Amino acid sequence: MTPGQATPRALQGAAAGATLWALDDEAGDFIYGANDGVWRVSWRQPDRPRQRLADLPVLGGIMYAAWLDAASGQLQVLEMREATPAERKRIKLQPPDSSPYVAVLWTLTEGRWRIREARDTSWGSDGSLGPAVFDDLRRERGRSARRADDDASCVRLCDQTATAPAGMQANDAEEWRVLPGSNGQIVFGVALGDGWHVVGPVGSTATGKILHAASANELRLHWHQARLLVAPVRLPAVATVYDFASGARQMLPLSNTAPVWVD
């Protein structure tokens, strides 16, 4: 990897079962969680020993997202917990068939997890507020893993519909979408489950060729500097990088962690 040259990387030196939490792009570090705690590891200096930041926070619900605060640099964790029967009485559901939750924002301070704030919220069907109740405090330094995942999935990618390009059949996919930022060069197939999901095939409108075959499982599409990273969601998996400038294709090694673009 050379400065200024974006490279897809997966976690290195991480324990089995490690989960990416956040990327500190300025420092060149991954923040991840594993059974043995929360760790910082460098992708720019792979020989630098990993740094243990803290124990895992003890949560009563799910960890929805984690990020480094843009102002303080402190690690934040957003927990989403189903409301208790007593809490349900005070939570107004909007719409009525949404679910009552308590969102809890944790902050890591001097190696200890502290609750910064808790807010009642309703979530789902589909007046979706849920985690967004803390959007006013979610100012990320670098990228949270949640944001990186959203940027590569239908959360961010599936707004612009497309038709099957020349050389591909319309019924090769349930529906087609244009990849944002690709100047219409790339279209991909989506399928409907609990929402729309990227499954492929992924094709080039310039050549009419399929770059990546349709998958039975969901895919993530990461577009950066005229290169496309196609990464299966189900792990372990082999991801593929397509370079539109040179026409080259690179298969990444089989990995138990999902690759993301880093600089």
Image: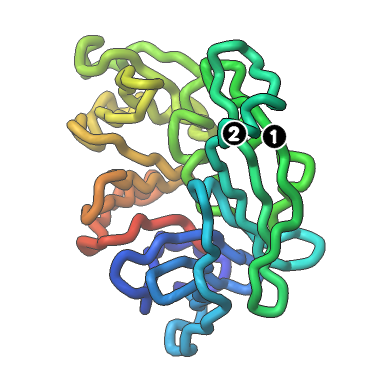
Could you say which quadrant of the image residue 99 lies in? top right
Could you say which quadrant of the image residue 186 lies in? top left
Q: Is residue 175 above or below residue 181?
A: above
Q: Secondary structure at mark 2?
A: strand
Q: Is residue 163 left or right of residue 61?
A: left
Alpha carbon distance from label 2 to label 1: 6 Å
Could you say which quadrant of the image residue 238 lies in? bottom left
Q: Are marks 2 and 1 in contact (CB under 8 Å)?
A: yes
Q: Secondary structure at mark 1?
A: strand
Which residue lies under the disc numbered 2?
Answer: 101
Q: Give how far across and how far down residue 231 sits, in percent.
A: 32, 47
Toward the viewer: 263 or 11?
Answer: 11
Q: Around disc 2, counting alpha carbons within 10 Å, would you say few (fewer than 14), some (14 to 19), or many (20 or more)?
A: many
Toward the viewer: 58 or 108?
Answer: 58
- The three-letter code of the residue at mark 1 reads Asp
Q: Give how far across and how far down residue 159 sits, in percent.
A: 52, 20
Q: Quadrant of the N terminus?
A: bottom left
